[in-house]
Image (spheres, helix red, strand yellow):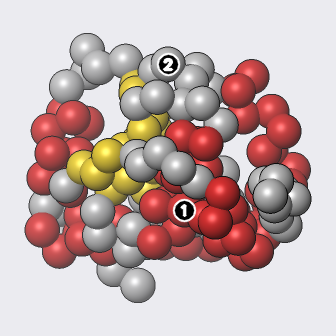
C-alpha cells in the first residue's frame, strides 16, 4: 500500500501510518543548553499557530504552522537541510512529534522532538515564558 496523500492542516496526523523511522527526543533542559550554545549549527522549527507563538516563543525558531502544511510542505527540502540537526517544537510535544516523524520520512536524518513542548520549557526551565 502506498503513502497517504499529503494532508491539509490538522489532517497531518494521517502521515503517522506511513512512517517507519523514529526521530529522537530532546528534553527541555537539554534544549536550553543547546540554545545557550551560539556555536551550534541547527534548524529550529515551531509548528504552532501564529496566535500561539504571539503568546509564547523561544528565540531562533521559525514558525511552520501545521494548518499551513499544504503551503510549505512541498518546499521543505529547499528551505531546510535534511542532513542538519533539526529541532521541532509545539505546545505540548504532540504536533511537533508528528512533524518530526514526517521530516524523518522526508529524509531528514537528525530530527529531535522537544518533549513536553514550550509548556514544559516554561514549567521546568524558564518561568518567564508565558503558559497558555
Q: Position of residue 52 (x, y in %)?
A: 55, 72
Name the disc covering residue 83, or none.
Answer: 2
Find numbered disc 1 in the image and state the secondary structure of the residue it sits on. helix
**Horizontal side, residue 52 vs residue 121: left or right:** right
**Is residue 40 visible from the viewing direction of this image?**
yes
In the displayed structure, 100 sits above or below 129; it is above
* Residue in view at x 17 percent, y 74 percent: 123
Q: Nearer the viewer, residue 86 or 59?
A: 86
Count of number-bearing discs: 2
**Horizontal side, residue 50 vs residue 122: left or right:** right
C-alpha span from label 2 to label 1: 19 Å
Q: Position of residue 55 (x, y in %)?
A: 48, 72
Q: Nearer the viewer, residue 97 or 59?
A: 97
Q: Nearer the viewer, residue 58 or 66?
A: 66
In the displayed structure, 128 sits above or below 42; it is below
**Horizontal side, residue 63 vs residue 69: left or right:** left
* Residue in view at x 53 percent, y 68 percent: 95
Find numbered disc 2 in the image and state the secondary structure of the residue it sits on. loop
**Which image quadrant is residue 16 in?**
bottom right
Name the disc covering residue 98, or none.
Answer: 1
In the displayed structure, 16 sits above or below 101; it is below
From the image, which quarter does the N terminus lie in? bottom right
**Is residue 46 visible from the viewing direction of this image?**
no
Q: Position of residue 67 (x, y in %)?
A: 76, 67
Q: Nearer the viewer, residue 95 or 38?
A: 95
Amino acid at each position: 500500500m502506498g503513502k497517504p496523500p499529503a494532508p491539509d492542516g490538522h489532517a497531518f496526523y494521517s502521515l503517522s501510518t506511513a512512517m517507519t523511522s523514529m526521530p529522537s527526543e530532546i528534553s527541555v533542559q537539554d534544549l536550553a543548553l543547546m540554545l545557550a550554545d551560539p556555536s551550534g549549527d541547527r534548524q529550529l522549527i515551531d509548528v504552532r499557530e501564529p496566535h500561539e507563538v504571539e503568546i509564547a516563543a523561544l528565540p531562533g525558531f521559525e514558525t511552520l504552522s501545521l494548518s499551513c502544511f499544504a503551503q510549505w510542505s512541498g518546499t521543505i527540502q529547499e528551505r531546510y537541510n535534511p542532513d542538519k540537526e533539526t529541532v521541532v517544537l509545539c505546545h505540548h510535544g504532540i504536533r511537533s512529534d508528528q512533524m518530526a516523524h514526517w521530516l524523518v520520512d522526508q529524509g531528514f536524518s537528525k530530527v529531535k522532538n522537544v518533549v513536553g513542548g514550550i509548556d514544559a520549557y516554561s514549567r521546568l526551565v524558564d518561568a518567564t515564558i508565558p503558559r497558555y
